[in-house]
Image: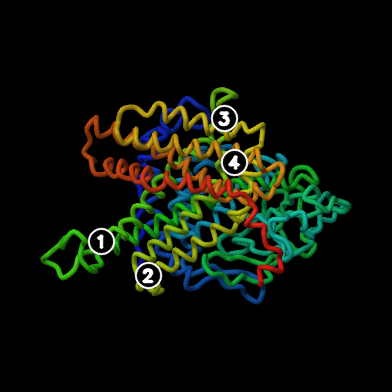
Amino acid sequence: MPVWNAPTRDTRFMINELIDLQSYAHLPGFASVSTDLTDAVIEEAGRFVGEVVAPLNQVGDREGCTRHADGSVTTPTGFKDAYRQYVEGGWPTLSAPEQFGGQGLPHAISFVLEEYMGSANQAFAMYPGLANGAISSILVKGSPDQQAKYLPKMVSGEWLGTMNLTEPHCGTDLGLIRTRAEPQADGSYAITGTKIFISAGDNDLTENIIHLVLAKTPGAPESSKGISLFIVPKVLVNDDGSLGDRNAVSVGSIEHKMGIHGNATCVMNYDGAKGWLVGEENKGLAAMFIMMNAARLGVGIQGLGQAEAAYQNGLAYALERRQGRALTGPAEPQQKADPLIVHPDVRRMLMDAKTFIGGMRALCTWGALQVDLAHAAETEEERQAADDLIGLLTPVIKGYGTDMGYKVATDMQQVWGGHGYIIENGMDQFVRDARIAMIYEGANGVQAMDLAGRKLAMNGGRAIQRLFALIDAECAAAGDDPVATLVAEKLARVNGELKASVMWFMQNAMTNPNNLGAGAYPFMTLTGIASTGLMWLRMAKVAAAALAKGTDEVPFYEAKLACARHWAARFAPQAGALRREIEAGADTIMALSPEAFAA
């Protein structure tokens, strides 16, 4: 039986020591933040998820969801009761606006819950996760009437939400969608079409689901400039807020998937279903991107979560499983063999995992803070800087975070050896569940192109220049601690490789756009190494200061310094190779004709 324990001590380090959330109490939305509050939320979230959600992970994987003859869907045993407890505990409301029944807490706090939920049971976490994205879109683009009608019960968790983009013939290229929206005399639209891969498309957790659906109105451009966004409730909502008739939307089937079996991934059929336009006609893609960006950050957190869960189980096995002897001589001569953790190659996988997890948790926590500062910081310049940085790093958190999350899951399965391939031990589920995170909400190649092809050039390169300057400034101010000095030295070199790669794109992508496409993925990875390196520089400084001041948690802070050194020794050197890969250009990638690939 796999284990899962909430990493509450590390979370408290991130919230209270690394970003010092309490220091922002003078800003709107932060006034109620205190160490007592954050610690209480962290500990209670860990308890709730550990006791209620985590035990259902293998249950959901084994049972999956069931579509019945009437088109309804039931979730695995225990999911409905767990969701009831989730709602009764007020967990959906953490960072939602107070005007719609939320608690209005900073996103850094709600991201803690997202990580724990996705780590303990990714399939279950996706149900409220999709609703959070739908709430974000309606908050920004919905009319006051739409907000009043739908948001209170979505915020409370009484209703869930989805996003409906993909169709059988198109995925990322949304300009090809065929779903149509015909205007009706009452101001609504009749939505007709089929959507696929709709996570949480139907379930028995709530009495209503608010679908956000992309469709095209009559005469709209056939490109992505002709897309509109519509609210299409599963059950129609009367003017007084009560539920009315069932809408003409149904589940055609549930996809049979490699993983996340506990989440109902549905084919959705819209047969003249009633829908209402969100925002302006033909401006639906911009509205949906609000939801997609929120979801992409959430998926990056899923990568972190799966890595954490797999790491806990890989570590537990390495500590107890005995195999062979340490290369330097028996570590435990009284035993017939030493534990796996004495072997350098096992240590390599564990240290890579622990270092990635720490760096990514810090990056996600700091990124959540930027989400809030983009709205709440004191000056326009500060708000712009926060918005630039989180916009730039969203595809990195999603892409690099899920690439590495999957790598950690497979490495931890490797630690188990042959036993990791046996289903009863649960390591295969971490690998299978982690794999989807690299694909959905925009495959990681799309994230790389969003970063290199779109985000770099926005506003004259303002965001990437901010990141360069931030890293340079913090490297220069590393202080005297030897570990922080080491990390700063290595990070400055990584930043140099990052700058050189951007310059190479500027010089070579205009004449041959394929050079940008060929280098986008290694550039995303390089940016991930740089941004987590910045986090390790900060963590090294905090840990060194805590040890110098005196603490009764010496092993905790010494482990931080050890991981910071590991980043400098094992992660930072990858930057040079990634730059050379970028500068190799597209020649070899594009050399073969399509026919020659089969030769």
Closer to the eye: label 4 or 1: 1
Does 176 appear above or below 397? below
Q: Are marks 3 and 2 in contact (CB under 8 Å)?
A: no
SS under mark 4: helix
Amino acid marked by disc 1: Leu
Q: Residues within 10 Å of mark 2 (few under 14, many from 20)?
A: some
Which label belongs to residue 319?
1
The first of marks 2 and 1 along the sequence is 1
* Residue 195 occupies quadrant: bottom right
Cα distance in 3D space between marks 4 and 2: 46 Å
Amino acid marked by disc 2: Gly
The first of marks 4 and 1 along the sequence is 4
Q: Which residue is mark 3?
A: 385
90 horizontally vs 69: left or right = left
Location of residue 538 in the rendering, given as x and y in whole percent from the top left corner = 39, 35
Cα distance in 3D space between marks 3 and 4: 28 Å
The first of marks 3 and 1 along the sequence is 1
Q: Are marks 2 and 1 in contact (CB under 8 Å)?
A: no
Task: Name the residue at 38% across, 66% down.
Answer: 414
Quadrant for the C terminus in the image: bottom right
Q: Which residue is mark 4?
A: 100
Q: Which residue is mark 2?
A: 420
Cα distance in 3D space between marks 3 and 1: 44 Å
The first of marks 4 and 2 along the sequence is 4
- The answer to whether one can see residue 243 in this image is no
- The answer to whether one can see residue 445 in this image is yes
SS under mark 3: helix
Location of residue 473 in the rendering, given as x and y in whole percent from the top left corner = 46, 27
Closer to the eye: label 3 or 4: 3
